[in-house]
Image (spheres, helix red, strand yellow):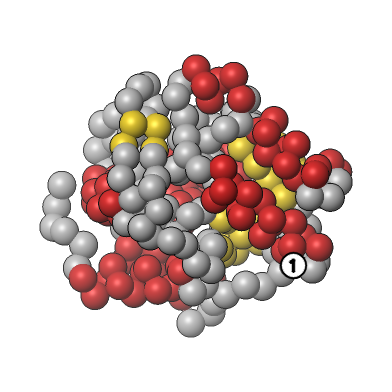
Amino acid sequence: MGKLTSAKSMMEAILLVLLDKRPKTDAMFIHGSSVTDPGLDDATLKLSRETLKRGDIGRIVINGVSESVCNEKNLAYFGCEPWLRTLAILGVERKDIVVLPESLHTAAESGNLITLALQSGWQSLTIFALPHHILRCMLQIVYLMEQRHVFLKVYARTLDSVDWNMDAEKTVLGGGFISGTMFNHIAAEYKRVEKYKRRDRVGFTPHATVGELIEYIHKRDGV
């Protein structure tokens, strides 16, 4: 697996992502739920509505996995239909929402998002995920852009605050679930960050290292 990520580079990457710039972008993609909690979903969708209303994003993009497939595959995401209904209740017009092709994991979401951006002529994107998940989302899209020789300006966004002591259950693709508090899910995400930096592609799509992510952000911002 190689050496563990250094504490310094991990801290740099986390701070760069959690406190990323918030420029106007062509669209904001909301990664499918990483924990099963309607309250967090509602907070996420309200934030996307407010961001759209301010004119900071041109479109809201959501994962196109259907509610029935999410139930069948035991995903934490409730499905695009419930999210579309909630966004409509919040006053978001359907023309302002783009539904991504069905994407069953973070790598598929990132790859399909890059394709959508290229087809739509988008040059800048905001990606949204919960705080413990957003680092890996950025690592994933940076790797896939590099593999496809694409350069988009991608910015990270998450909730401004989270109750880390709240109960949080994550259903697992293929069956089972991980329970505990939101705090308990941090360690699992760190293990995935270390696992997916491998490049042998055995059973998963790799992502960028934290060093590669830092280099990308410097390039994106002209540092």
- Evaluate whether residue 179 shows in this view: yes
Q: Residue at x 39, y 40 (%)?
A: 169
Q: Residue at x 50, y 43 (%)?
A: 37
Q: Which residue does the numbered mark 1 point to in the structure image?
A: 56
- Evaluate whether residue 197 shows in this view: no
Hey, which quadrant is residue 7 in on the image?
Answer: bottom left
Q: Position of residue 223 (x, y in %)?
A: 48, 82
Q: Residue at x 38, y 48 (%)?
A: 167
Residue at far bottom of view: 223
Residue 173 versus residue 41: which sits nearer the camera?
A: 41
Q: Is residue 185 above or below residue 219?
A: above
Q: Is residue 14 left or right of residue 56?
A: left
* Mark 1, other Cα within 10 Å: few <14 / some 14–19 / many ≥20: some
Q: Is residue 123 left or right of residue 1?
A: right
Q: Position of residue 91 (x, y in %)?
A: 84, 50
Q: Position of residue 204 (x, y in %)?
A: 33, 34
Amino acid type at circle 1 is Asp
Q: Residue at x 53, y 25 (%)?
A: 70
Residue 88 versus residue 24: which sits nearer the camera?
A: 88
